[in-house]
Image (cartoon, coloured by chain):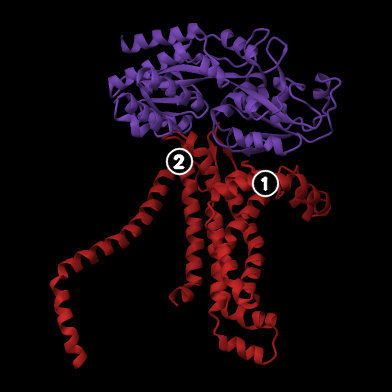
Chain colours: A red, B purple
Amino acid sequence: MASASLTAPKVAKRRASSLGDRIFAMLCQAAGILVLILLGALIVELFIAGLPAFRAFGIAFVTSTDWDPVRELFGAGVSIYGTIVTAILAIILAVPLAFGVAFFLTELAPPWMRRPVGTAVELLAAVPSIIYGMWGFFVIAPAFAQHVQPFIIDTVGELPVIGALFQGPPFGTGLFTAAFILAIMVLPFIAATMRDVFEQVPPVYKESAYGLGATTWEVMKGVVIPYTRVSVVGGIMLGLGRALGETMAVTFVIGNANRISTSLFGPGNTIASLVALEFGESEIGSLKLASLLALGFILFLLSFAVLATSRYLLRSRLKA
Amino acid sequence: MNRRSLLLGASAALTLPALGAHAQGAQITGAGASFPNPIYQKWAEAVRGATGIQLNYQSVGSGAGINQIRNRTVDFGATDAPLSAQQLTEGNLLQFPTVMGSLVAIVNIPGIAEGQLKLTGPLLADIYLGKITRWNDPQIVALNPGLPLPSLAIAPAYRADGSGTTFVWVSYLSAVSPEFKEKVGVGTSVRFPVGTGARGNEGVAGTVRNVRGAIGYVENAYAITNKLVTTQIRNKAGNFVKPDHKSFMAAASAADWSVPGFAANVIDQAGPDSWPIVAPTFILLPINPNDAARSANVRRFFDWAFTNGSRLAAELEYIPLPESVHNAVRAAWRQSFGA
């Protein structure tokens, strides 16, 4: 009772400025709704602007591997293939590394090292993508062209079946280089998520396992990973979403050819890099511009689906 | 007052032309081709000093430049690929050339030095079609007796972004090879059956430098500033010519400019010394401008550039147009705009 009477004057004071409260609440609400409208408007606008391409080529637009601006034949097949292959390859390269980082930071590293290394990994995410692009083009691509690729082409490339993935002239640029750069770019997202969810495992579980004589690895394998499995997959999807939409760095190193090559060292294209490259030379009202916008629409759907899945899998962690 | 204009000039020179603009009011805006951007910026600097006209030029690409001038969001558009007479009529636009540029082929072959390798147009077309795949192909060896051509795979590099440079390059290859014309065609971005793409002149130059056996095409200025290995090319007269000022000027004066929209075909010109791959770049000016005074200032700008800008153009490795073309453009202005 006493506390109620103490707070009473405050309540009265609040009521006096309730108009301000209401305006503020409305502004905040408007801001929230604006984001929803923006998202919806973007996707509708992209779809409408890309409609001429869907009309001209039908559903075959998604699968067609044509991209011939001279004859006005456009298809999304090559860039969808490049987008998915580079993103998945990047994940394959990044996940073991990210797991190592997270495992080290949560279980093995001495406490004084955890902050600096953790921060360094997170700072990787703050490097602008153009920097990765230039680094990839001027440092990684020549190194790949002169050392890594000739070696792999001469060894793995000679093997039956799998060799076909590693053949062709060593340009340095190509799907593999793009995936390599992407792997470094998505590493911080996956590593940070993994570290965060690993840290959320209740200590009592881990201590019980240690008490039973389990080694660090056994605790990781038997307790931490099963406990966090869904969130870890969510973190990987987060990285995948980022890899799908990355533009600048990929454009520099992917080789930008509108062909599907069987070799991972061959040049390719992603949706984002194709749009970035061709946009400046597309005239208003042309089928090419419509096709580029249709590509944007497809990329939007693809990223949206992946990120929505990631959100769904991470929901328990986000609530916490 | 002097000090003030000095300050304004200085701030404008620091790539902030928009800030100093309101002081004099004679501002003009243009957008389009990136190929002539360096010379337009250079001219803009000089014209500002001479006449007070301030040019704000956005190097956004020819296609975007055409879009912007069709929507009249700028005072003039700039494009490398000329519009057809019909397109000009539809857009109510006047088209005229400003300067020319030249393309060179660059190669990275161990043991081959600058200007040594001799190639022909049809050979270049076959290389970009993927029909000739090794540097010691008999056809290349036959042209280059005595050169140590290795058994190295040819790795063609091309511009991945849509660009006027690609337009000129494939125009040349299509002019000399019917097969290239049929299979690839002409455009600011085309589908090359082989090779790898890179972004911008610097990207192609970088790829050629990195990859042994690579061949690429860049604007001449890039080859010179980056000290790239260029080749000789056989011209229409059957002579092998080196890319230098003399062969460029020969091509410029051999062209026939008396066509609608000045869309002269300067590719693969006759003449014993003509470099085969040169191309003009164009300005698109509305015939019914929203603001007549600004349109007049655009013409004053290029009139100054024609009269005084040739030396600056040559310094940046562009090819100035012949005097007769300058006068023909001025005549076209008088015809369209009166005065």
Q: Residue at x 79, y 49 (%)?
A: A153
Q: Residue at x 65, y 13 (%)?
A: B247
Q: Quadrant of the C terminus of chain B?
A: top left
Q: Residue at x 49, y 42 (%)?
A: A291
Tag 1 subunit: A
Q: Quadrant of the N terminus of chain B?
A: top left
Amino acid type at mark 1: Val
Which residue is labeled 1 in the image? A139
Judge by depth and name the residue closer to the eye, B151 or A71.
B151
Tag 2 subunit: A
Q: Give the quarter of the image for residue B170.
A: top right
Do tags 1 and 2 sit on the same chain? yes
Task: Report if residue B140 is visible in the image.
Answer: yes
Judge by depth and name the residue closer to the eye, A130 or B53.
B53
Q: Is residue B84 above or below residue A98?
A: above
Number of numbered tags placed on the structure image: 2
Local packing at callout 2 (Cα closer than 10 Å; few below 14, some 14-19, many 20+) is many
Q: Position of residue A46 (x, y in %)?
A: 42, 48
Q: Position of residue A163 (x, y in %)?
A: 79, 53
Judge by depth and name the residue closer to the eye, A201 or B138.
A201
Amino acid type at mark 2: Ala
Tag of residue A290:
2
Numbered disc 1: secondary structure? helix
Local packing at callout 1 (Cα closer than 10 Å; few below 14, some 14-19, many 20+) is few
Q: Is residue B250 above or below residue B77?
A: above
Q: Position of residue B27 (x, y in %)?
A: 33, 26
Query: Which numbered disc flags the more N-terminal residue, 1 or 2?
Result: 1
Tag of residue B260:
none
Q: Position of residue A111 (x, y in %)?
A: 60, 76
Decide if residue A180 is on the left or right side of residue B260.
Answer: right
Q: CA distance from mark 1 to mark 2?
A: 36 Å
